[in-house]
Image (tube, rainbow, N blue to C red):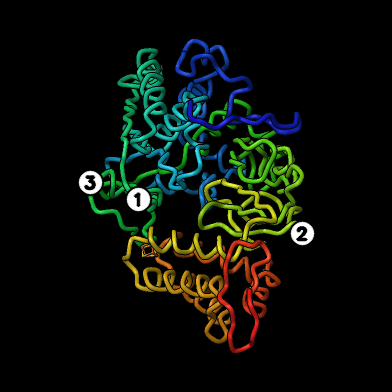
């Protein structure tokens, strides 16, 4: 099992993705079937059929758990209707954020939910092939997944004649090695084609032109794992677990200055404070300073923002994003200016280089951050930082560039005092940066 513990959550938080109790052997098909696995696949094939599945998903209000939060009924419909003899389903389990293991933990603890959801998707969009793409170094995940796929094939739930219906659904696992950008869906598809990984402009969307130019339905494992619950349980209770526009649950990984770091499944829309509580809060003598929400291209939110809901719309309004599902809690010893500059540098280093505003703009942004931390500002750095961030985001070809400015912008929006301390007093309140003495003003850091 991946080295991240699953945190207990309050009884009011439903478990739709993770199993109620950790299974002794997650690839045990009989145990999974006793717990209800593949009931939804049977319902989909024998009862609902493709149109019915798409209708139920549309009515459920469910949106993809990934960065875009796209309504999944709409995406499945577009893929199903797209012209082409061959359609594909791709499970994007690459998970770019190197510090986040949520998808791996899901695949290792509940592989049949992901497999069943992806098989239902294949049936609904008319695909015969499902590809699960993940990091090559996730060897334990690959082992469990391959075992589970083999067991499902042997049981007649996948393969040439699924549940005696004549449907053919083949699964394969594709371990990939590459950069941060491989998690972006168009890059992932190029990786699967053996091509150089750079994002493509969308539209056309992958649902109509994806892998090898064929219509391709691509989601992360959490989205596929939620599908059987919706179909097997009906749609009645599903929207109640989150805001109407973001029904369901999502997995988060909480780390940093918390009592119990780990992974938790939470309903969309719970407040950041509730998520913090799941991880036991911030133990003394640490003091809460900020939450980095959304991974390396996420935003810093202050204590005042802990009432914000953990869902795409609420976080976007607060200048953050769901992103990788990572929440890093920072205490008084962290300098958000320094960390934002470091993250921006990371994003600049990981950019593929295809578009100039991203390749050059992010690097310049990181340099502005570094100058502020080093006590060498040049004129109106905050104005320059804000203008450049907006320009970079506006000219984005892909989500990487669109979101990579969030950390710096959030510092300007929420931590102006800390910026001013660096800029006006040559001081770092967290004691991390060592701004140089301003000899003109006669002050020292
Ligand atoms: S925006 Fe950045 S990461 Fe995206 S394609 Fe352009 S250079 Fe590559």
Q: CA distance from mark 3 to mark 2?
A: 47 Å
Q: Is mark 1 within 8 Å of ligand 1?
A: no
Tag 1 near tag 3, CB within 8 Å: no
Q: Quadrant of residue 92?
A: top left
At mark 3, the secondary structure is: loop
**Where 165 sits versus 141, above or below?**
above
Residue 31, position as x, y percentages in the image: 52, 12
Residue 373, position as x, y percentages in the image: 56, 70
**Residue drawn 68% across and 29% down?**
8
Q: CA distance from mark 1 to mark 2?
A: 35 Å
Residue 150, position as x, y percentages in the image: 35, 18
Residue 79, position as x, y percentages in the image: 40, 46
**Residue drawn 39% across and 55% down?**
205
Quadrant of the snapshot with the C terminus: bottom right
The label shown at residue 304 is 2
Q: Quadrant of residue 346?
A: bottom left
Left or right of 264 on screen, residue 111:
left
At mark 1, the secondary structure is: loop
Residue carrying label 1 = 179
**Where 133 sits versus 160, above or below?**
below
């Amino acid at each position: 099992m991946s080295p991240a513990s699953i945190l207990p959550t309050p009884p009011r938080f439903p478990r739709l993705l993770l199993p109620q109790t950790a299974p002794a052997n997650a690839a045990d098909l009989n145990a999974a079937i006793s717990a209800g696995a593949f009931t939804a696949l049977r319902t989909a094939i024998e009862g609902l059929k493709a149109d019915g599945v798409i209708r139920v998903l549309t009515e459920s209000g469910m949106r993809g758990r990934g960065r875009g939060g796209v309504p999944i009924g709409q995406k499945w419909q577009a893929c199903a209707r797209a012209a082409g003899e061959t359609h594909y389903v791709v499970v994007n389990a690459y998970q770019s954020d190197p510090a986040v293991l949520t998808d791996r933990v899901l695949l290792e603890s509940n592989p049949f939910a992901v497999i069943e959801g992806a098989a239902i998707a294949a049936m609904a969009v008319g695909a015969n092939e499902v590809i699960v793409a993940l990091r090559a170094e996730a060897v334990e995940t690959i082992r469990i997944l391959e075992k589970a796929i083999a067991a499902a094939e042997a049981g007649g739930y996948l393969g040439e004649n699924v549940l005696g219906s004549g449907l053919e659904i083949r699964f394969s696992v594709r371990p990939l090695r590459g950069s941060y950008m491989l998690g972006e869906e168009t890059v992932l598809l190029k990786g699967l084609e053996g091509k150089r990984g750079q994002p493509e402009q969308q539209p056309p969307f992958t649902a109509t032109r994806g892998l090898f130019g064929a219509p391709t339905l691509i989601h992360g494992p959490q989205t596929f794992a939620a599908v059987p619950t919706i179909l097997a349980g009906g749609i009645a209770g599903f929207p109640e677990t989150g805001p109407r526009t973001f029904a369901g649950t999502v997995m988060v990984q909480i780390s940093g200055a918390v009592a119990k770091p780990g992974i938790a499944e939470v309903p969309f829309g719970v407040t950041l404070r509730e998520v913090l509580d799941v991880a036991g809060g911030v133990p003394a003598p640490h003091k809460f300073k900020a939450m980095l929400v959304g991974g390396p291209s996420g935003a810093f939110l202050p204590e005042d923002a802990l009432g914000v809901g953990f869902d795409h719309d609420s976080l976007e309004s607060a200048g953050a994003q769901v992103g990788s599902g990572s929440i890093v809690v920072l205490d008084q010893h962290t300098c958000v200016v320094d960390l934002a500059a470091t993250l921006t540098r990371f994003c600049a280093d990981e950019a593929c280089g295809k578009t100039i505003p991203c390749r050059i703009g992010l690097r310049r942004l990181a340099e502005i951050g570094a100058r502020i931390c080093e006590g060498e500002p040049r004129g109106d750095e905050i104005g320059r930082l804000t203008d450049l961030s907006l320009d970079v985001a506006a000219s984005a070809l892909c989500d990487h560039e669109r979101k990579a400015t969030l950390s710096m912008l959030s510092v300007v929006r929420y931590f102006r005092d800390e910026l001013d301390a660096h800029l006006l007093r040559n001081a770092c309140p967290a004691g991390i940066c060592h701004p140089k003495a301003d000899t003109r003003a006669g002050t020292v850091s």
